[in-house]
Structures are given as C-alpha cells and as structure tokens.
Amino acid sequence: MRSTGFRRTFAAIGVCSLALTAAACGSGDDSASGKTRITVNCEPPKSAKVDRTFFDSDVASFEKQNPDIDVVTHDAFPCQDPKTFDAKLAGGQMEDVFYTYFTDAKHVVNIKQAADLTPYIKELKSYDTLQRQLRDIYTVDGKIYGIPRTGYSMGLIYNRKLFQQAGLDPDKPPATWDEVRADAKKIAALGKGTVGYADYSAQNQGGWHFTAEMYSQGGDVVSADGKKATVDTPQGKAVLQNLHDMRWSDNSMGSKQLLVINDVQQLMGSGKLGMYLSAPDNIPILVKEKGGNYDDLALGPMPGGQGTLIGGDGYMFNKHDTPAQIRAGLKWLDHMFLTPGTGFLGDYARAKKANAPVGLPEPRLFTGAADAKDQQVKKANANVPVQNYQAFLDGNQSLQMKIEPPDAQQIYSVLDGAVSAVLTKKDANIDQLLKDASGKIDGILARG
C-alpha cells in the first residue's frame, strides 16, 4: 500500500495510458532537434491546479537550465495503476523515467524491465545525501536500479480535544497497545457516537494495517527469505485478539465495520474519532477535505515500541533508455525532488504562499547537512503546529523501519479476511483464521 499524499493533499498520480503507442511513452533521443528527449510520469492532473502549476513550473525551469534536454510529462490518476503496470512494462509503453512504489523495485528488476543506473550514479549529485535504507530499496544484487523520491512511516494520529475531554494527556499518546485499548475505552465513553479507535478491514487496507501492527510488536508476516508466512505466531494472535477485544468487549471501535481509509478519515475529520494508524500526510487531508483542525490533530509513534511500516515511492528508468536519457533523467530528478529546500516537494516558501501545509514531520529523505538544510527551510516556513508531531519524531528514533512484504497486495487481500472476521463476528476463531491465512500466503509466495 501507499500513504495518501505527499506534502500536500496531492496523491500519487500520472501514468501514460495503455491506449498510447509505445513511441508515445518511451520515445528515445530526439536527434532531429539535437536534444535528448525523456518522457516522465506522475505529473499532477489539471484538477490539482496548485500542484500542476508547481510541477510544470519546475519542469520549465529545468529545461531553461538544460536547453539540450526536452522533458515530456504525462499525467493521469494514479501515478501507478497496479492493474496496468506490468502490461505497460511488457508492452514497451512505459515512460523513460517512471514512478514506482517501493514494493515494486525488485519485481521490475526481476522481470528485466529496469535500466542499471550504477555506471551513472555518480552524476546524481544528491545520491549520497539520501537515507541509506531508502536507497537500498532500489539496490538489487549490488546494482542500483532506482532513486527514492519520498518516504513515509506509520504512526498514530489522535484527536487532542477528545483526549482532553476524556481526561487523557494530549501530549502523551499511548505507547503500548494496552494503553491504546485503555485510552480508546475512555474516549468511547464520551458517548454521542464517539469512537475510541478505528481500523481498516476492506480493500486490502485491513491487511496493510495488520502488517503494520505486526511490525509494531516485533513480528512479521513473511520470513526473512520471503518463502514462508509468519502470521500464525504469538504476535499475529495478539494483533487479532486486541482488535476483537476492543470491538466486542470494550465497544470502543464502533458498530460500523468493514471500513476503508475514507471512512476513517471522515470520522476523524468530524471530531468523532480518537485514534487511528496513519502516516503524517493524512493530516492535511483531514483538514482540507474532511473538516478537521490542525490544532486538534496530533501524531504519536506506532504503539508497541518495536517497529513501524515504511513505504514510499521513487523513479526507475526504462531498460530501453540510452545513456544520454539516463543522464538527463538523473539531472531532472536532482532538480525536481532531491535538492533540499527547492523543487516540487521542497520549495516550502512557495508552498506556504499557496496555503499548503508546511511543517509535517515527513517525508524525511535526506541525511547530514542536506537534512539539516531541508529541516531549517521547512521550520522557517512552517504554518502548522509542529509541536503536535514531536512525539512521533522522538518515538521513531528507536523503532525498526520495515518495508512492506513481497507480493504485498495479494497478502493484504488474504489478511483482510482475518481482520474483517474479528471485527464483524464476535465468535471468530482467531487460531483458525491465522492458520488459514498462513496457508494461503504460503501458496502466494510459492507461486511468486
């Protein structure tokens, strides 16, 4: 899965339609004009006017600085459609520089559709400033096949106002799942339709959160070698038992279940929800689209204290790209996304002028001096209550950052069934649910 936006309310977007010809996407060098021509995707759609303007402006400034490079942008929604992604790759219709989720990196390499960037990586000025754990996602067998653009880690969004009304300290989010359960019960006791804690349980999103909750307790859903399921474990049972008990014993999760992200965001934005798991980029969506207030919304680290799920995106290069196109694409990435304090995601002064939220704790892409500069510029332009996110920043320092499992969407679909069962059936057999899920995941991994 992915989170729901980047720095603003813009969600990942833009792919070249399958209806287009191969030449329209992977276009090759334009020798007639003497320019190197590259096609790129994930341009914001026209409906996202501010983001579209920023993106196109940054592309124009890049072309002005590099008159020998012609950038052709493609937009659609979403940036990557899982239903057409492999077909585009196999059909030669993928852009020269194309968007991927972190979970796609090894797959694209395994099906031999990615260009090896290793010989050219020294030309990406920012590469050594990027977080190693994010760089490593696009490194396969010692070779570099992609560049991370943004990343997120899961945490606990909570409503400070409801915490206060329930007699809880709004500056101290729950650090364990027992504390989550206790706090949720107090919040639900406020009545008037208030829900203490909500979770997803449909459209693969329940499996996504099950995985995050496993990580938070030191568990995993797949073995280290990627060959066997590891959900039928004490940690797996603890995840489902906790959800079952909150739902049926405590009545702190509300009676409506089979929720997806929009349902939970609506609850939180309306002030009727105490807590749910999310990445920081949910916060501006809650405010701008769901009626929430920045002052009421805060972020804590994942409860459990062991680990958290990370995700994000980056760009890979078409295997048919020429050396000139690879060099041009790397220059474009540096200009657009990877220079602290500037570019589409980093020009915080520009974002502030456009009334976009500045000061959220993520994405945090850089390290060292580059990170210090990025944070300095962000802090100088902050227009959200950054103190509400300090617990998240502090707590993340001790958590293990873990990427999603292989074959994530198929596995999440299986785990959806287990999560939805405990939230909709009081007599759900947790041991049997985990045994069945384990067998199905083993089958998925064997086919992969």
Image (cartoon, helix red, strand yellow):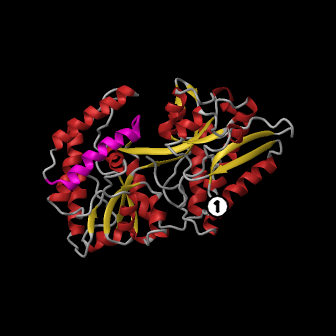
Whether residue 294 is in magenta: the answer is no
Q: Quadrant of residue 200?
A: bottom left
> Residue at left 60%, top 62%?
48
Whether residue 410 is in magenta: the answer is yes
Q: Quadrant of residue 218?
A: top left
- Residue 435: x and y in percent read 20, 35
Q: Farthest residue in the front direction?
A: 19
Position of 397 relative to 360 (above/below):
above
Left/right placement of residue 54 relative to residue 273 reads right
Position of 5 relative to 334 (above/below):
below
Query: What span is in magenta?
Result: 402-426
> Residue at left 52%, top 34%?
105
- Residue 103: x and y in percent read 47, 38
Under mark 1, the amino acid is Lys
Position of 415 relative to 294 (above/below):
above
Q: Can see residue 38?
A: yes
Q: Nearer the viewer, residue 214 or 378?
A: 214
> Residue at left 41%, top 28%?
448
Q: Quadrant of residue 307?
A: top left
Q: Residues within 10 Å of mark 1 (few under 14, many from 20)?
A: few
- Residue 32: x and y in percent read 86, 37
Left/right placement of residue 337 relative to residue 110 reads right
Q: How many numbered markers are drawn?
A: 1
For label 1, the SS is loop
Q: Farthest residue in the bottom direction?
A: 192
- Residue 140: x and y in percent read 52, 27
Q: Nearer the viewer, residue 336 or 318?
A: 318
The residue that label 1 is drawn on is 46
> Residue at left 35%, top 43%?
412
Main SS, magenta residues: helix
